[in-house]
Amino acid sequence: MAETETPARNALLVKYLNEAYGKEKQLETALAAQIPLVKRPQLKKGLQEHLKVTKAQARGLEKRVKQLGGKASTNPDLPGPDVVAEAAGAAAHLANRAIAGAKGPVQAMRGTSPADNDLRTVRDDIWNEAEEIAHYEIIETAAAALADTETVRLARTYRKEEERMQRLLERQIPPLVKEVITAEVPAAERRTNRPNARTRSARTSTASGRTSTATRSGAARRSSGTTSSRQPATSRATSGSRRTSAG
Ligand SMILES: [Fe+2]
């Protein structure tokens, strides 16, 4: 491998690989804290499996960093191939674990019910997966530009794993929301929204005295943004999978 002949190239990749590594190590701790609190079986199983994936990703990142002449570190400020910072790396690793660990007890206190807690976990983890996807997109793009096919392959594989997890998390939202509503909103209040409906229709009839309905709905469509007005929520999964297959 010619990697030792091009330290600047490797340093750049090691920098981004180490940032992803730090994120994965944080997630290891966060997932381990979330799992015992989660009630929904599909979500618990998904998180348990993703914890294994996360650990494997961290190991894979560590291995690739070493192959590029660097030292795996959870401190993104540390230079890559400069093999000096074992103690500093260990300290940063502990700091990351502490940050992630602090999140556990906070999560334990959240929510008004087990389903509500699950929903908050899903929300946090969708956000975490999005960050990881961004890490791997950057690594993949940088490695491709530097003709490092092995790093490209690693980043692409991990990105797809994160995207799969993100889709699993998104699928948990409708049943969990339903469960929260069932637990927190009395049945008599669930199906009718009459007070709001009356307010809305009253507002519309008042406004139509001043502006035509067609003009108002056209303006509303423009101001609400093209994506939400043109694309029904049910088609989001389709466009998501299209994006994935394109990537
Ligand atoms: Fe991950």
Image (cartoon, helix red, strand yellow):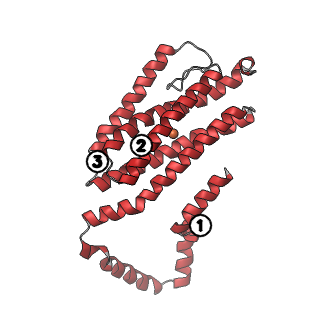
Residue shown at the point (52%, 34%) measured from the top left: 56
Residue occupied by mark 2 = 48
Q: Nearer the viewer, mark 1 or mark 2?
A: 2
Give the quadrant of residue 172: bottom left
Q: CA distance from mark 3 to mark 1?
A: 35 Å
Q: Residue furthest top?
A: 84
- The residue nearer to you, when weighing 62 against 112, is 62
Q: Position of residue 132 (x, y in %)?
A: 53, 41
Separation of residues labelled 1 and 2 (CA atoms): 38 Å
Determine whether, in the image, residue 128 is placed left or right of residue 18: left
> Which comes sooner in the sequence, label 1 or label 2?
2
Task: Write down the quadrant of residue 181 in the picture.
Answer: bottom left
Q: Residue at x 40, y 40 (%)?
A: 31
Q: Which quarter of the figure has residue 162? A: top right
Q: What type is the residue that disc 2 sits on?
A: Gln
In the depicted view, which residue is nearer to us: 135 or 223? 135
Q: Which badge, 3 or 1, is on the more N-terminal residue?
A: 3
- Report the number of numbered marks: 3
Q: Secondary structure at mark 1?
A: helix
Residue 198 left/right relative to 24 = left
User: In percent of the image, x 40 and y 25: which residue is there?
Assistant: 95
Specify whether residue 148 is in view.
yes
State whether label 1 is within 8 Å of ligand 1. no
Quadrant position of the N terminus in the picture: top right
Graded by Cα atoms within 10 Å as few (under 14), some (14 to 19) or many (20 or more), the crowding at tag 3 reads some
Q: Check disc 3 and report the residue beneath it.
A: 110
- 78 relative to 118, above or below: above
Tag nearer the camera, 3 or 1: 3
Disc 3 element: loop
Q: Badge 2: how crowded within 10 Å, few (<14), some, or many (20+)?
A: some
Asked if the residue at tag 2 contacts the one at tag 1, i.e. Cβ–Cβ closer than 8 Å, the answer is no
Q: Which residue is mark 1?
A: 226
